[in-house]
Image (cartoon, coloured by chain):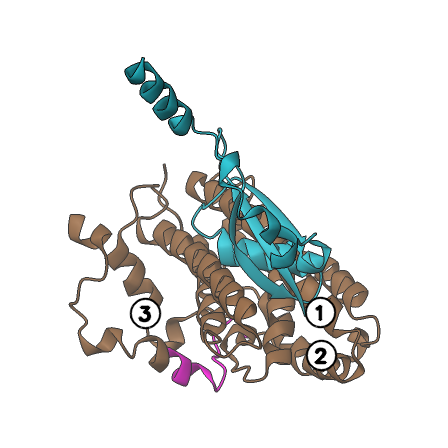
Amino acid sequence: MRTYEIFLKRDGQEEYRHAGSIDAPDDELALLLARENYLRRAEGDLLWMVDRAHLLIGDRDFVAPNSDKPHRDNDGLLVAAHRKSQREST
Amino acid sequence: MNPITPGTAEFLLAFADDEHLMGQQHTEWIGIAPFLEEDMAFASIAQDELSHAALLYAIVADDGQGGPPDDRAIDKLAFDRTANDYRSAQIVEVACTGWAHALVRHWLYDTAEELRWTLVEDSDLEPLKDAAAHAAREERFHIRHADGLIDVLLRTPDSADRLADAVRDLLPLAMSLFDPVAEEAEAVEAGVASAPFDTMLPEWTDRVRTRFPDIDIGSVSAPELTGRTQRHGDFPALLARMNKVRGIDPTAIWSDATVRQ
């Protein structure tokens, strides 16, 4: 058995969203089983499936170094506070 | 629209009973199919077959007038007849307790069913024509599902042997699908069907041969034709299971649709 990840999209502007995963022996059955397991109630208009073995995966070690850089969260609040304090001190 | 003739009603009941019992048999794999995804898929296909049965029973129930479906009238035809009055084929009545047999029956049945709907796709009976269009959209996926599983299983010698045994066991019963009801000719004369169902037997046989080339289909003895009046020995138990819950309270209301009526 292979494991496949399933993404569904409705017509319109919604993006593809992860719906779940299934086990299937090959691609053809994966498509057919996904149809009967995830699309029985018109949950989407379009289907993407990918064999999990074909996913490119960034693991925790790969992602973690960027988790301690709050200066990249540029929401402008710190700058605004700084300018306000400068105005008030002059 | 003219009311349907008794012969046409029999023709439609045979089709409806096959769909109904096939759906019922498939649903009995819920929870025990070989793997979770198949469990769900097989039951989902079963629901499709049950919905086809409901469409066909509805046509008989309101004499082909195309009115809104009457759930109680449909249930009466589906559940409340005596064994002798059913017109199902023995292939949908026999108990298939092994997965190989259930899967092979799924393939044999749906291959025949797909051909059967083509006989009524241009029917003069409008609700039947609509039902055929509805069913045809689903049937191509049923066949792909059965073919997909069989393709995978044939690669393993043990599985291939089990499938071959199932085909040999079930072929004679499957041929009984083409056993016509008496007066089927009325349905053809009335323009309800374009031809008798047994005219599809050669095409069906060709497809069986292509799918299972190692089986000598010529050596299979065809079943005795009874006009679908003889029930298989497994039928009474099946009918009892179907009515087990319903029989607890026959007056119970089962759906919002029924409440609204």
- The first of marks 1 and 3 along the sequence is 3
**Chain under disc 2:** B
Q: What is the display colour for chain B?
A: brown
Point 49% across, 40% down: residue:
A70
Q: Is residue B159 left or right of residue B128?
A: right
Q: What is the display colour for chain A?
A: cyan
- Do labels 2 and 1 touch, CB within 8 Å? yes
Q: Nearer the viewer, residue B252 or A28?
A: A28
- Does the image show residue B198? no
Element under label 3?
A: helix
Residue labelled with disc 2? B163
**Same-chain status of marks 2 and 1:** yes
Residue B243, quarter of the rendered image:
bottom left
Q: Position of residue B188 (x, y in %)?
A: 55, 48
Residue labelled with disc 3? B79
Residue labelled with disc 1? B150
